[in-house]
Image (cartoon, helix red, strand yellow):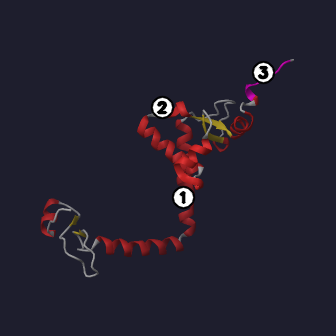
Amino acid sequence: MIKITRAEAKKKGLTRYFTGKACPRGHIAERQVSGRKCMVCWRKKRAGVVIKWKKINREKVRAAGRAYWAKTRSTCIKLLGNRCACCKETELAFLAVDHKNGGGNAHRRKLFGTLGSGGRMHLWVLREIKRVGLRRVRQQFRVLCFNCNQAFASLGYCPHKLVRKK
């Protein structure tokens, strides 16, 4: 880190500066221009406040988390087609992201370990779309309803695709 005085940082319009000197608690870290607080001390104090707030507002935190993951899932599914590739089901509650070539469990374990979940997979797919583009991601993934997804997983084909003989 480059050493800079508070006055110089203020002139440059910076929010933090680094002197190289320890704070009263012994941390050698950046400080805030506005309050001269050591960033390590400030983060520790702030973390305690946040933890306390989260305990008091547990339902708000959970509701915000549910809303975040629901939005992530719906965005992912909308980008990948917004309907089942097999039976054309469009009800969002019934739709899931599927690996076109199989191997979804192994892929999820490779990315997230044994505790990987669908929500994290949706987030990974969205990041992958930003990284390599929607066309490449659509080559690997598709949207299926849960019935078609389960049929492909257990039977290897979907009954919707069977041509019935008379």
Image-based side of 125 in relation to 94, left or right: left
Q: For the residue carrying disc 2, how many other residues have a C-alpha within 10 Å: few (<14), some (14-19), or many (20+)?
A: few
Q: Quadrant of residue 161?
A: top right
Q: Earlier in the sequence, mark 1 or mark 2?
A: 1
The residue where tag 2 is placed is: 136
Q: Amino acid at mark 2?
A: Arg
Residue 109 image position (x, y, % from top left):
57, 49
Task: Tell me if I can see residue 72 in this picture.
Answer: no
Q: For the residue carrying disc 1, how many other residues have a C-alpha within 10 Å: few (<14), some (14-19), or many (20+)?
A: few
Q: Earlier in the sequence, mark 3 or mark 2?
A: 2
Identify the residue at the far top of this view: 166
The residue where tag 1 is placed is: 65
Image-based side of 134 in relation to 144, left or right: left
Q: Secondary structure at mark 3?
A: loop
Residue 86 or 28: which is nearer the viewer?
Answer: 28
Q: For the residue carrying disc 3, how many other residues have a C-alpha within 10 Å: few (<14), some (14-19), or many (20+)?
A: few
Residue under the point 54% across and 33% down:
140
Q: Secondary structure at mark 1?
A: helix
Identify the residue at the far bottom of this view: 24
Q: Amino acid at mark 1?
A: Gly
Tell me, for residue 128, which label it has, or none.
none
Residue 29 image position (x, y, % from top left):
26, 70
Residue 68 is one of the magenta-drawn residues: no
Q: What whole-number distance in Å separates the C-alpha atoms at marks 3 and 1?
A: 44 Å
- The quarter of the rendered structure image containing the N terminus is bottom left
The residue where tag 3 is placed is: 163
